Image (cartoon, rainbow, N blue to C red):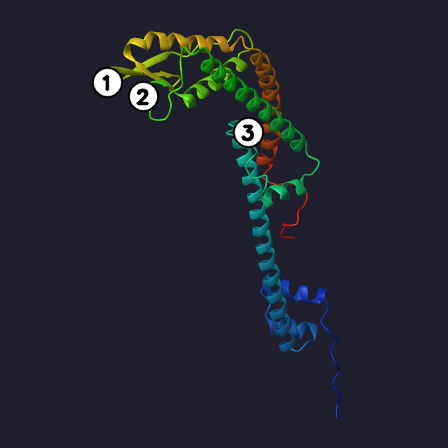
Amino acid sequence: MVKRMKKPPVRPEQLTDWLRRSEMEGESSPNIAKRDGYDVRTVRKHLDLARQERETREARSTVLRRALEQHYADLIAVVGRVDAQVSNPAGIPIVGQDERLWKALREHIPRAALWKLLGRWERLQQQRIQIHGDVVLAIEQEIEGTGNYKFAAIGETFGLNRDGIAKLVTHRLTQVAKAPGEPPEPDIIQSEDVGNDSVRIVCAAIQCATVPREEESQAKAFLRRLQVGIKNRPEAHEARRVHAELSKVTAALREELATILLRRVVPGRCKYCPF
């Protein structure tokens, strides 16, 4: 009885050759087996296993690639929200600072200039808010101290609108701070008839007071003096300084954010990276 010779195991490079010949050159499994001296069942088995392994690798690669793309998209979305708030701040702290992705961004780029700029930006915003609050409080106390005008209490029709005056003071102080030289002229003060022989005084789309019609001229004059006087207050100089520095920091900060947004890929790694 003739003893059968056991064929050596199929080497990886040989299997790669079989795949090439089968898929690119169209060679049949029986022909590959005949030329290389293998049983056709062995050839078919290894070709099937090789194709399955390749499909598994490709599927895994696709899943990981999509996960990484989504991870970058999530980080970029956070940066986009910060950029939107920096360009038109509605208050601080910055949106997203407590989010996991915000912390992940710090892990990706811990040494980026972004973080120092953002810290300066927030401190300057706090200073700006503090200055505005101090001026509003001071003017409210001055109004209440003079006795010429009073804030309307709850349920009263006539008087100054406390919230409106605060908004007007903040609006005017912002105008003064932005003006490097002579501040712009005060906003036009208008009146609206609200019936019962009374008028509502509006300035810069802000409702500032409701007064009897016979006091309309005096109320408008008072609001004009209030606007004009803000430029001479001691806080106005500090507001200009803060605004000038804030403008420079904001420009530099937005440039850093734009670099991240336009690259669309954040360097480094974080604990949420897919791999």
Foreground residue among 268 and 37 = 268
Foreground residue among 97 and 257 = 97
> Is 22 on the left-hand or right-hand side of 167?
right
Label whose residue precedes the other's in the sequence (2 or 1):
2
* Helix, strand or loop at mark 3: helix
* Helix, strand or loop at mark 1: loop
| Rendered residue at 33%/23% (across/down) | 156
In the rendering, at what x and y percent does residue 268 appear?
68, 43
| Rendered residue at 73%/74% (across/down) | 9
CB under 8 Å between discs 1 and 3: no
In the rendering, at what x and y percent does residue 196 appear?
23, 18
Q: Which residue is mark 3?
A: 86
- Give the number of callouts: 3
In the rendering, at what x and y percent does residue 93 appear?
57, 33
Label whose residue precedes the other's in the sequence (3 or 2):
3
> Is 42 on the left-hand or right-hand side of 209?
right
CB under 8 Å between discs 2 and 1: yes
Q: Marks 1/3: CA distance?
A: 45 Å
Q: Residues within 10 Å of mark 2 (few under 14, many from 20)?
A: few
Q: Residues within 10 Å of mark 1 (few under 14, many from 20)?
A: few
> Is 65 on the left-hand or right-hand side of 88?
right
Foreground residue among 198 and 118 = 198
Q: Which residue is mark 2?
A: 157
